[in-house]
Amino acid sequence: MMILNVKHNQVEKTTQTCNLPVGLIERLVKALADGGDYVLDPYMGVGTTAVAAILNNRRALGPDIVAEYLETAEERIALARRSLLRTRPMDRPVYRPSGMEKVVQNSYSGDKTHLRLTP
């Protein structure tokens, strides 16, 4: 199984460069902690583990040294508690391109950036 981080166009994307999908962490939380247990994430980042814990009736603890990540974590945790946080469902298959998509290419020309669609 390949584990991918959240990409730029996914609903779970945050300012953290390598946040993991909540669905992935949910699997771990469900397998390793019983309902009501505490889940500790020693490098909490943007709170993905805490969100997964909350969504599965667990409690969460975790520090981080990046203030921006902790602010994002607090927002995500508050949304998760109110069932308003958008996440990719755990059972949704990974998108696989068909090969028929059009791609935007970025070509640099002098001091201007031009975007064009390829046929």
Image (cartoon, helix red, strand yellow):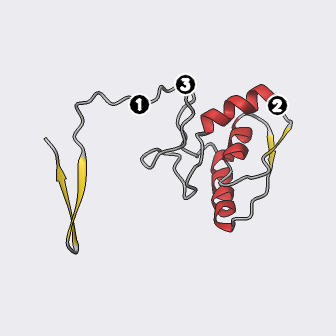
- Quarter of the image holding residue 87? top right
> What is the CA distance from the residue labelled 2 to the residue labelled 3?
20 Å
SS for dot 1: loop
The three-letter code of the residue at mark 1 reads Tyr
- Amino acid type of disc 2? Ala
> Mark 1 near mark 2, Cβ–Cβ under 8 Å?
no
Q: CA distance from mark 3 to mark 1?
A: 12 Å
Residue that numbered label 2 is attached to: 33
Residue at position x 66%, y 63% from top? Answer: 71
| 41 to 28, vertically: above or below | below
Of the residues under marks 2 and 3, which one precedes in the sequence? 2
Quadrant hosting residue 68: bottom right
Q: Viewed as shown, does residue 70 lie left or right of 61?
A: left
Q: Position of residue 76 (x, y in %)?
A: 63, 52
Q: Which residue is mark 3?
A: 91
**In the visual, does 109 lie left or right of 49?**
left
| Horizontal and vertical percent position of residue 110 | 20, 72
Q: Is residue 93 left or right of residue 18?
A: left
Q: Which residue shows up at 22% across the image and 75% down it?
A: 111
Mark 1 vs mark 2, CA separation in Å: 30 Å
Marked residue nearer the N-terminal end (1 or 2)? 2
Image point (61%, 34%), residue name: 23
Looking at the image, residue 84 lies above or below residue 92? below
Q: Which mark is residue 95?
A: 1
Residue 58 vs residue 67, the one in the foreground: 67
- At label 1, counting other C-alpha atoms closer than 10 Å, the crowd grade (few under 14, some 14-19, many 20 or more) is few
In the rendered image, residue 105, in percent from the top left (x then y), is placed at: 24, 51
The secondary structure type at the circle numbered 3 is loop
